[in-house]
Amino acid sequence: MADDKKHDGELLQLVTFSIDDEEFGVNILKVQEIIRTMEITKVPRAPAFVEGVINLRGMVIPIIDLRRRFNLSPKVHDKNTRIIDCEINNILVGFVVDAVSEVLRIPAKTVEAPPPVVSGIGADYISGVAQLQDHILIMLDLDKLLSTDDLEKLGLLQQ
């Protein structure tokens, strides 16, 4: 995040969640809702990180497993697993996370550009890092999490 875009009093409102032992945050304005896991229908020949699709109130929503997207080992869904429905490029997509933590407000000035060391996780979609009292929060840019090519493979982009 560029320093010239930060205002001293500006607060960022984030939905925070965990994957493995890391905590991530996304802008709350991108989040439509957070739901418990439900039956996910597998999609043949979908990319490995696509868990499948769900029917949510008559809408078919693709479900992305963020563990697989970040090349982490799979985990069986448990009572804490959640699906975060987000809008990406005007498309509703669900992301499976290990657990949702909280809605957090942090000063924009505490967010720094991601250090070069995070390039292994997928620095393309890391928009910044924030040092909180006892840990670091990795902020994701959802618009970069799925490339145009990924969206086309999923049949989500009109050609």
Image (spheres, helix red, strand yellow):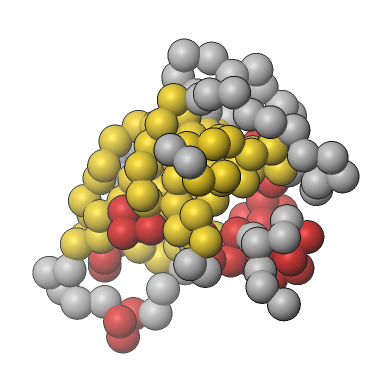
Outermost top residue: 79
Q: Is residue 44 above or below residue 113?
A: above
Which residue is pictured at 12% across the width and 69% down the height? 9
> Residue at coordinates 66% horizontally, 73% vertically from top-left?
158
Exactly how many numbered labels are in the figure?
Answer: 0
Asked which quadrant contains residue 129, the reply is: bottom left
Q: Specify whether 66 is left or right of 4.
A: right
Q: Residue at x 25, y 45 (%)?
A: 104
Judge by depth and name the residue closer to the eye, 117 or 69: 69
Give whichever of 129, 33 is nearer the camera.
33
- Is residue 140 shown to the viewer in this render? no
Give percent across and percent down for residue 19: 54, 34
> Which quadrant would the N terminus be assigned to in this image?
bottom left
Side (left or right) of 75 relative to 42 = left
Instruction: Locate residue 55, reporting x and y percent.
Output: 54, 36
Q: Position of residue 74 (x, y in %)?
A: 71, 27
* Quadrant housing the C terminus: bottom right
Against 48, residue 118 (above or below) is below
- Furthest-right residue in this view: 45
Residue that appears at 39% across and 79% down = 2
Above or below residue 13? Residue 152 is below
> Farthest residue toward the left?
9
| Quarter of the figure with residue 6 | bottom left
Task: Please indicate, yes or no, whether residue 16 appears anywhere in the rendered image.
Answer: yes
